[in-house]
Image: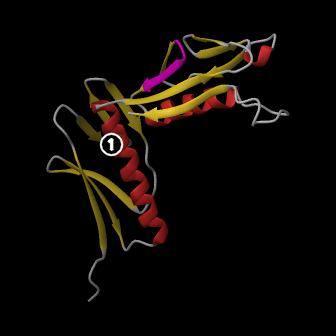
């Protein structure tokens, strides 16, 4: 008789967080709600004793990797609704003072390297951008939205065709909380 090999991981659900698992995993908290669909056939997501349980029966290498990925996504959803995600960025210029303005769905960067036309960076999903002097703060409950918004800001001020040792202007990631 063959004994069932089961890889099992548990994610504790903190106070004030409600997790429902149907077609998709929905996490609700005081800061909002996040939903995500995980459709990988060999990983089972269920709720048991106040924990989210992930199981893979007779796991192969890819199944173990997917189990870890799904665990990280669910943990990030829970962390986003308890603490939120905050990334700090810095506006750096040596040649031309640039102006950064945050709108509803995009950030406008004016006078970057003396260019006439403004550059824009898209704000993704529910992320929020605040500009305070030389500092740009990107916050939100969805880690992927906050990270992509930060990456869009860095990419919008990427310098091409000039010596990067001389032209170090841009908006750069400094720290995260």
On the question of residue 126 being in view, the answer is: no
Q: Position of residue 53 (x, y in %)?
A: 26, 55
Position in image of residue 150 (x %, y %)? 55, 30
Q: In terms of image quadrants, where is residue 155?
A: top right
Going by the image, does 68 lie left or right of 144? left
- Image height of 128 relative to 63, above or below: above
Q: Is residue 171 above or below residue 108?
A: below
Residue drawn at the location 65% of the way across and 13% of the way down? 108
Q: Is residue 135 magenta?
A: yes
Marker count (numbered): 1
Residue most extreme to the right: 161
For the C terminus, the image quarter is top left
What residue appears at the point 56 percent right and 28 percent down from the top-left corner? Answer: 149
Question: With 76 as the anchor, is 134 left or right in this view?
Answer: right
Give the image's coloring scheme: secondary structure
SS type, badge 1: loop
Q: Which residues are magenta?
A: 133-139
**Residue displayed at 54% across by 11% down:** 104
Residue 132 seen: yes
Q: Is residue 91 above or below residue 42?
A: above
| Crowd rating for badge 1 (residues with CA inside 10 Å; few <14, some 14–19, many 20+) | few
Can you identify the residue that label 1 sits on?
Answer: 22
Q: Is residue 18 above or below residue 105?
A: below
Task: Give the residue drawn at x 40%, y 58%.
Answer: 68
Residue at far bottom of view = 1
State the image quarter where residue 81 is shown: top left
Q: Quadrant of the N terminus?
A: bottom left
Q: Is 158 placed left or right of 128 in the picture?
A: right
């Amino acid at each position: 008789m063959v004994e069932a090999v089961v890889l099992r991981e548990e994610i504790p659900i903190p106070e004030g967080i409600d997790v429902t698992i149907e077609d998709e995993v929905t996490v609700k908290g005081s800061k909002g709600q996040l939903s995500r669909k995980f459709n990988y056939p060999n990983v089972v997501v269920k709720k048991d004793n106040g924990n989210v349980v992930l199981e893979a029966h007779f796991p192969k290498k890819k199944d173990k990797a997917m189990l870890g990925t799904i665990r990280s996504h669910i943990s990030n959803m829970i962390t986003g609704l308890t603490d939120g995600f905050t990334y700090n960025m810095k506006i750096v210029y040596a040649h031309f003072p640039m102006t950064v303005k945050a709108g509803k769905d995009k950030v406008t960067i004016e006078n970057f390297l003396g260019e006439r036309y403004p550059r824009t960076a898209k704000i993704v999903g529910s992320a929020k951008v605040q500009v305070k002097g030389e500092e740009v703060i990107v916050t939100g409950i969805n880690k992927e939205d906050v990270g992509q918004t930060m990456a869009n800001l860095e990419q919008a001020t990427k310098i091409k065709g000039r010596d990067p040792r001389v032209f170090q202007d841009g908006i750069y990631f400094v720290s995260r909380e």
